[in-house]
Image: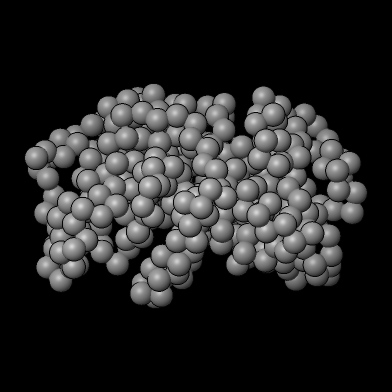
Amino acid sequence: MPTTRVVLPGVVEPDGLRLERTDEPVPGPGQVRVAVEASGISFAERQMRRGRYYDQPRFPFTPGYDLVGTVAAVGAGVDPDLRGTRVAALVGTGGWTTHALVDAAALVPVPAGVDPVEASTLVVNGLTAWRMLHRDARVRAGQTVLVHGVNGGVGTVLAQLASLAGARVVGTAAPRHHDALRALGVEPVDYTVDGLEARVRSLAPDGVDAVFDHVGGDVLTVSHRLLRRGGALVSYGSADTVDGSSNAWWTILRLLVRLQWWNLRPGGHRATFFSVWGGRRNPARFQAGVRADLGRVFDLLAGGRLRTQVAATFPLDRVVEAVRLSESRTVVGKVVLLP
């Protein structure tokens, strides 16, 4: 059976993405072939398309940070009973395809009855949100958190997890998203006009206990100023530089230096940079952590305590349209491809 995959040939606009058909991949030792049912579109792919993701492979390659699908074949050393089971995987690249080779150690079981599209919205976004909230910021009941871009894929999950933890959630978003965000328990703030800090302080006069910031730049400075004593700032991106021309690694380095400088200043604040790949130098421990944390998020979904936000779904041959919509800033939640 032929495999269809999306190829990112270089720094291109969305219409430069192309489809390529190849032979079905054969799993090697320790691998499985997954028949992909859903793969989300993340902000990371936008950065990769512009050659500005700090850890992307050389062009050309197949994007796709995560995937959900059914194990179709197994390689040597892999339990044959895995065939036919639905799994999820954090892969970094390679998800936008009909058939993907994945290390068996990277597979996370998807609970019975969970829709693959809904599960796909939580692989990178749910794992990111859970770890930032519970491991980095260590948010507790009664605290107030600020989530920038709360209408996005990570933001909508983060807001719900924070609410489940007993925290109050303030979130920045364009006014067209405010009604949908209120339904998630978010107190929305308009970021499109001047005076962001003052509008947040009108809701939290004493500041907030944690800020989750993927924007960077001047917004990151505002985020730091809004922290209460002992508060946590978690940076997990630099969206303001996605269309720039500086080296991607240099951008991250400057961000890390900035956060460390704040940690050295008085005030008791904690400023950290989150990467979902942190700790992967120990692959066994890393994969075990992914299975545990993503498993917790999937359990919340299966139990009806977490709602997914699917902005739209597209077949693989409409990837250009899907990417354009995902990058339009007009959606709540995540756009998902259906290979």
Residue at 75% in and 61% down: 141
For the residue pair 37 and 171, the one nearer the viewer reads as 37
For the residue pair 263 and 106, the one nearer the viewer reads as 106
Residue at 22% in and 46% down: 35
Above or below residue 103? Residue 33 is above
Quarter of the image holding residue 315? top left
Residue at 43% in and 42% down: 118
Residue at 55% in and 43% down: 307
Color scheme of the displayed model:
one colour
Horizontal side of residue 148 vs 38, given as left or right: right
- Quadrant showing the N terminus: top left
Horizontal side of residue 36 vs 273, given as left or right: left
Quarter of the image holding residue 186? top right
Horizontal side of residue 38 vs 245, given as left or right: left
Please say whether residue 225 is visible from this viewpoint. Answer: no
Horizontal side of residue 162 vs 131, given as left or right: right
Residue 223 in the image, given as x and y percentages of width and height: 75, 50
Residue 336 in the image, given as x and y percentages of width and height: 40, 36
Residue 221 in the image, given as x and y percentages of width and height: 75, 50
